Image (tube, rainbow, N blue to C red):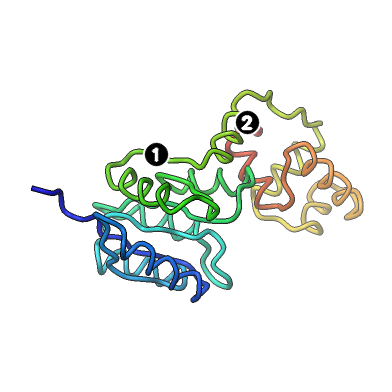
Amino acid sequence: MNPPAVRLLVCDDHAVVRAGLLALLGSAPGIEVAGEAGSGEEAVALATKLAPDVVLMDLQLGAGMDGAEATRLITAAPDAPRVLVLTTYDTDADITRAVEAGATGYLLKAERPEELFAAVHAAARGRPTLSPPVADRVMARMRSPRPSLTTRERDILAQLTQGLGNREIARALFISEATVKTHLRRIYDKLGVETRAGAVAVAKEQRLLA
């Protein structure tokens, strides 16, 4: 007797992309598309309502809740489904946020359909799957030494983790906003990120402020 089909919820904010995924996955052996969502909020609600085995989650979902936050909420629920990220983004910060949120796998949209099908089945069994470029980045990060930050850079990074803006950081540390911006650029360069959220994610991942 064949095992039951993997029930899948697809979340992507682009209607054309979502339609393509639904058509592709709907024809895959052993996969049953249980529903679709166009936003993070909708994905969280449908994950509870439909109880799929796997949620296929994009990371960038336009305005509102992003894929990482939706993943965190979905995987925190009792008897939670597995979340398999499918995205075009492979930065260290994106990967870190998704994994910390509870994603079982991380695939890029450039993967072949067969790889996507296999990853869905693997996720349903709780087995992690990473696209080769993502796996390479993870391994490189594990092998690389921790970034060397100055005391002032650590001070500013600590303020970032509290959600403070440049003006608030300047006031808290008794420095100018221009100085804060200069240090932020150096922090971004050292951590290999481009945004405040990325810096905070890497800081937590590597325990730079522990």
Q: Where's residue 193, x and y in %?
A: 72, 45
Tell me which label, 1 or 2, sits earlier in the chain.
1
Relative depth, front residue between 39 and 166: 39
Q: Is residue 136 left or right of residue 8?
A: right
Which residue bears the numbered disc 2? 141
Disc 2 packing (10 Å; few <14; some 14–19; many ≥20): few
Report the residue marked by disc 1: 128
Image position, residue 29 (x, y; %): 26, 55
Q: Which residue is at a point 30% across and 47% down the rendered structure image? A: 121
Give amino acid for label 2.
Arg
Could you tell me which secondary element the residue under label 1 belongs to? loop
Secondary structure type for disc 2: helix
Q: Nearer the viewer, mark 1 or mark 2?
A: 1
Instruction: Please say if 65 is above or below 179.
Output: below
Q: Would residue 161 be found to the left or right of residue 172 on screen? A: left
Residue type at mark 1? Pro
Quarter of the image where one finds residue 141 = top right
Q: Position of residue 138 (x, y in %)?
A: 57, 34
Q: Quadrant of the C terminus?
A: top right
Rendered image quadrant of residue 30: bottom left
Residue at image point 61% right, 48% down: 90
The spot of residue 170 in percent (x, y) is: 83, 52
The residue carrying pointer 1 sits among few (fewer than 14), some (14 to 19) or many (20 or more) residues within 10 Å by Cα, namely some
Which mark identifies residue 143?
none
